[in-house]
Image (cartoon, coloured by chain):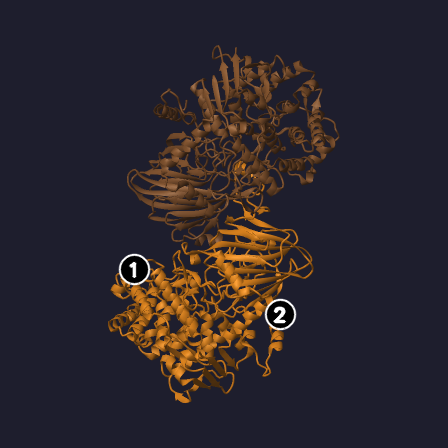
Chain colours: A orange, B brown
Amino acid sequence: MNHKFLLVLLLSLSFLSLKATDKGGEEPVDLVNPFIGTSNFGTTNPGAVCPNGLMSVVPFNVMGSDLNKYDKDARWWSTPYEYHNVFFTGYSHVNLSGVGCPEVGSLLLMPTTGKLNVDYKEYGSTYEKEVAHPGYYSNYLKKYNVKTEVTATPRSSVARFTFPKGESHILLNLGEGLTNESGAMVKKVSDTEYEGMKLQGTFCYNPQAVFPIYFVMRVSKKPTEAGYWKKQRPMTGVEAEWDVDNGKFKLYKTYHKELSGDDIGVWMNFNTEADEQIEVQMGVSFVSMANARENLDAEQRGKNFDAIRAEARAKWNDDLSRILVEGGTKTERTIFYTALYHVLIHPNILQDVNGQYPAMEGDEIRTVKEGNRYTVFSLWDTYRNVHQLLTLVYPNRQRDMIRSMIGMYEEHGWMPKWELFSRETYTMEGDPAIPVITDSWLKGLRGYDINKAYEAFRKSALTKGSENPLRPDNDEYMEKGYVALHEKFDNSVSHALEYYIADNALSRLATALGKKDDARLFHNRALGYRHYFSKEFGLLRPLMPDGTFYKPFDPKQGENFEPSPGFHEGNAWNYTFYVPHDVMGLAKLMGGQKNFVNKLQSVFDKGYYDPANEPDIAYPHLFSYFKGDEWRTQVQTRRLLKEYFKNAPEGIPGNDDTGTMSAWAVFNMIGFYPDCPGDPSYTLTSPVFDKVTIRLDKAQWGRDNLLIETVRPNDEAVIIKKIELGGKPLNRYRITNDELLKGGVLKFYLK
Amino acid sequence: MNHKFLLVLLLSLSFLSLKATDKGGEEPVDLVNPFIGTSNFGTTNPGAVCPNGLMSVVPFNVMGSDLNKYDKDARWWSTPYEYHNVFFTGYSHVNLSGVGCPEVGSLLLMPTTGKLNVDYKEYGSTYEKEVAHPGYYSNYLKKYNVKTEVTATPRSSVARFTFPKGESHILLNLGEGLTNESGAMVKKVSDTEYEGMKLQGTFCYNPQAVFPIYFVMRVSKKPTEAGYWKKQRPMTGVEAEWDVDNGKFKLYKTYHKELSGDDIGVWMNFNTEADEQIEVQMGVSFVSMANARENLDAEQRGKNFDAIRAEARAKWNDDLSRILVEGGTKTERTIFYTALYHVLIHPNILQDVNGQYPAMEGDEIRTVKEGNRYTVFSLWDTYRNVHQLLTLVYPNRQRDMIRSMIGMYEEHGWMPKWELFSRETYTMEGDPAIPVITDSWLKGLRGYDINKAYEAFRKSALTKGSENPLRPDNDEYMEKGYVALHEKFDNSVSHALEYYIADNALSRLATALGKKDDARLFHNRALGYRHYFSKEFGLLRPLMPDGTFYKPFDPKQGENFEPSPGFHEGNAWNYTFYVPHDVMGLAKLMGGQKNFVNKLQSVFDKGYYDPANEPDIAYPHLFSYFKGDEWRTQVQTRRLLKEYFKNAPEGIPGNDDTGTMSAWAVFNMIGFYPDCPGDPSYTLTSPVFDKVTIRLDKAQWGRDNLLIETVRPNDEAVIIKKIELGGKPLNRYRITNDELLKGGVLKFYLK
């Protein structure tokens, strides 16, 4: 165990002992270990953030030194923090958690001491004594003997730096960050306040998906001197000879109006006493600097660092306590609550305290009518389980997210695919808004304009490809029922599989809305996957434009994110069982239950299963469609949980994908998993805990609690012996959401 | 003669013939040739500007192509236009005229056609058919078949582009310009309006003298498509591989909010019909974008291009007609009015139409109480003659300039030295505000707080060097009466000579204000130049800290702007006679009139005289201090006028120095020259014209006109035979301003 990590655990434990209740209990918030997922490309971070908060403050340690193992400029890198890196260059404000492309992670705030130096390669520092709790992070900068702490409100943050005696500095670097965009503006408002803007974007290298972040920064002490810096464009010839600052970081000492440029920043000098604390507040907005100020004022006025930290902690504890788990090991409870914590980071609120937000893909500023406007919709990931978890446990949030998605359609003309701060990045494929909203609707969540949503779904389902940003292959798909391979490494099969899943959900929604013709049309389209089934291989196989199969065909090509003809981020094995809406039909194609189960089992046995990416993450649940083979679901999910979800920086199998991997763990740990998006049902799994109390929204679900109780002869027992729902025997391994909520108590007996 | 130039002359002539009055007369404005001084490092330009206007629109042709002889990036270069260059990259907005360091000259506006290209090295064009008149410039872009025209109001401009049929573009380049500063911000306000800011500064490589210019741009037609561009910072490694725009100009097609960066711009696409005209208005402000808009609205509302052009022309004609010249050749009249035109460009107004302006060296915005706030004070140059000319002919403007200077003292604590858009650049040396204001005061110009000015003068005269930005050598100067050489190429003698001149003026002002002790103190200090007189060489010679002369001493070292121990931009010959306040004392040191005159004559005979720099430009007038040698003044000034001031791009001997060289020509051509700054007197010269009518401000001078009449036997006659003032014989060659104005008519008889 890493020493740093051990320290955190020890600190957590000592903290817990103080907070322990009379019953020897523990608060969920204190079980969260924000370091989980901060290595092994989990791309989560230990920064301070509120539940679904716009602001996050994250220790930025991925640039500027060879001491780091991972460098954002030297390799593909998508997160502001890596657990095993050591070179800290400041706190980044507003960050993404668990994503696979670099974005945001800028407004880098750094305390230093000694001679002023504004070059991050030189002013960065190693650190120790890391502490992270929900809404709080701290470390100690070894180079400067400065203790740093950060906490956050939904739209602002505050950092507290404890300086030694002497010459101290606070730097705001607007030139660097995780984003690949550049260009910023800053302006001094007063001796202790600065405002500005930084451009961000090009997420997953979509060059047009750019957006501004506005900020206001305040320091608690007036600097003795302050100014800007800007890296000077290299000049040549005579120009260069005459400019002492050529190619260097020029310090602006007397200019305090607007400064714009690619690589700029703010420096402030202080004379500090020993242990003197200076606080730096940061308010942000995606609308304007005025709104950033209003956000900061509204959320921090009258509160000091400790009050804000306590508030953030309380918010987390309230949210995490919506699911109370008992039993299991402390490690398992830590893994569970940390997973739930990660699920509750994105989507996050976008609107300012005055309700304003940037409209989708436009220049307009709008005001929310009710509830929250959400952003950061990584829908190809989250349509699988995150929104199902939110629908059940946080239905008001899910309702606002659906309203937000419908709002995006109204503003932009299309449902979101991978929406990021009101820009559509078009990352990944498919039409994932359809299963997200259909699932909620079919479960009974109301309060949004379903007809408007249906209009949007029908539009993307039926618009020709050249005018359809969500389904660019729609012409061929509508005509032939599949998408053929047109370029060697295109993702044609992956695209089509997503369309089938979306069309299945749309068919179900059409049925629910009484649109029979549509229901039939989309149902038939959803079964088009059968075109791809190759009897020769017993697998899905790319098709050529002439209808023949692609050859030569190597089902294993595409492992480890290598390019693969027809498949995106995976190979034929990772996609063949990716027909959650017609498992029985696929089994029939394969020759029946035995063949299906054997083949599916071989995916696990031969190591084809990829726990770190979405297409196959519901594979373990497919066994439960077949009588007598359900135990395989239980064994595999428990095995995967144990093998890939740990109380360690490497404790998430890969990119958390804005909570998708974590939601997988949450569901499987409590005993059921929504394996077919758009189908309001769950497959039962083997619970890790003895008792799970889901505190329900009674107005939504008609009851206060949902209980999952588990009786096990010993800790090694993972296979379900029998099940009772609402006190009555249940002889199935898949149940609907309605059944679950009506039953109220789901009781497992393991053997 | 260059073809281009011939064409302009022919066009001018044809224009004149239409404008000729019944008397066969000509309007002064039509005699101006804005191409004079646009080569030979005159650094004037043919752009459109109003008298003392903040805005100027100048064809920018000094970057981007090897076709150009002079390139701003390849050599020391300080002007947006060179007559012999050929590669046009747009119109720069707000420019300096006649300066020796690169500054401003940005907001580059360019029309193009065909495929969109935003790289100035590629979109630039050669041109032909240049036409320039005061307030108007036009050319024809050969690459695009676009006719371009520009005109200006005091704070705004309008360009008119006549396009061919097809795909056309308008580009606003905010990345390039003459300034060595960088960084800009731009934001779309509507389909036809953009606002923004660009940082400028580092004039004469003062890295801290930076300032923002704000702008609003409007186009008369809605573009079919529009966006921004930004040159992307070069990335390396994996980042670079994934970014298609790496190191290139990235086109932003859907983002329209604030864009900031080092190298950014705006592109607009149009479908144009044949000969379709699109106009582009630009408003500027040094206060804010809102003020830039207000300026544009106030000065252009309800006026089209032709109306604005006519207004600019009328303004110029009114101003130029304050001095009416008759006789001389048309070339001489052209040279004269062009010189007067160049004198009336700087200092220029700074405040917006609402009266706001940026306070000197601070972040404050102030509002003018009355009159205009002026900026661009190149005082080491203009204290010699520009302000004397303004005092006599444009006294209200001079009064406002003095008020502006006193305002700068109030805001910044120091009188200006080389003020530029409310930044002190500290270029060149001395304390030149003292003679400027003293001269006006002693001549009777009132309407400003002379006691406040005196307080400022006394402060810089008596504050110790380490706290004195105007006189950094003041400790040694006050203690020893001179400044010693401390570094090989310092400008110690030049510094001290300026202090002597300033102290002489201050002594005169002290006398006028009844401050006898001060008057004595500063008078004595003003004679300290005698320390530098070397009997061995008969010249001023640098002194070492121990009081001995610097050796080895080469009086000629320092020619052609080479470094010289003790002397700035010159050598001992260019500075020895630079004691205008004690010519007789210097003559005495040299051994009397004969030695003095012989030595001074040798300066001209041996070619030591530099007509292109200030220290020796009053040398020719010194002969007139000596009875019997006055003719030498007359011969030399007429010779220098003929040799160095021409109706040609090379028609100014060197940097016009914001009108100083031109003011030299104006005074000498009409018959008198103010050779001793701070002494309200003139030395008489040999008039070029037969009759000069200076239309006076009667409220100031008590009369409507001042006439200078000259009778000459033939055109070769240059030597003064006799002089009459107010009808009475005048037996002197130096007269006071009072005498001149009292006399009313100065009549020369040449022989």
Q: Residues within 10 Å of mark 2 (few under 14, many from 20)?
A: some
Which residue appears at 48% of the width and 81% of the height?
A693
SS for callout 2: helix
What amino acid is labelled 2 in the image?
Leu
Residue B409 location, x and y as percent?
Answer: 61, 40
Q: Position of residue B517 (x, y in %)?
A: 72, 31
Tell me the residue at 58%/62% (across/down): A159
User: Disc number at residue A465?
Assistant: 1
A715 relative to B342, above or below: below
Q: Which mark is residue A7?
A: 2
In 3D space, how far apart are the residues under numbered discs 2 and 1 (Cα atoms)? Answer: 55 Å
Front position in the image: B523 or A540 = B523
User: Residue A130: percent from the left, percent from the top?
Assistant: 60, 66
Question: Dot 1 falls on which chain?
Answer: A
Q: Helix, strand, or loop for circle 1?
A: helix
Q: Quadrant of the rendered structure where residue B548 is?
A: top right
Identify which amino acid the numbered label 1 is placed on. Answer: Gly
Q: Is residue A205 above or below residue A320?
A: above
- The residue shown at (39%, 47%) is B193
**Left or right: A255, with A453 as reference point:** right
Question: Mark 1 packing: few (<14 Cα in 10 Å), some, or many (20+)?
Answer: some
Residue at the farthest bottom position: A728
Q: Residue drawn at (37%, 20%), measured in percent from left and top? A: B24
Pointer 2 indicates a residue of which chain? A
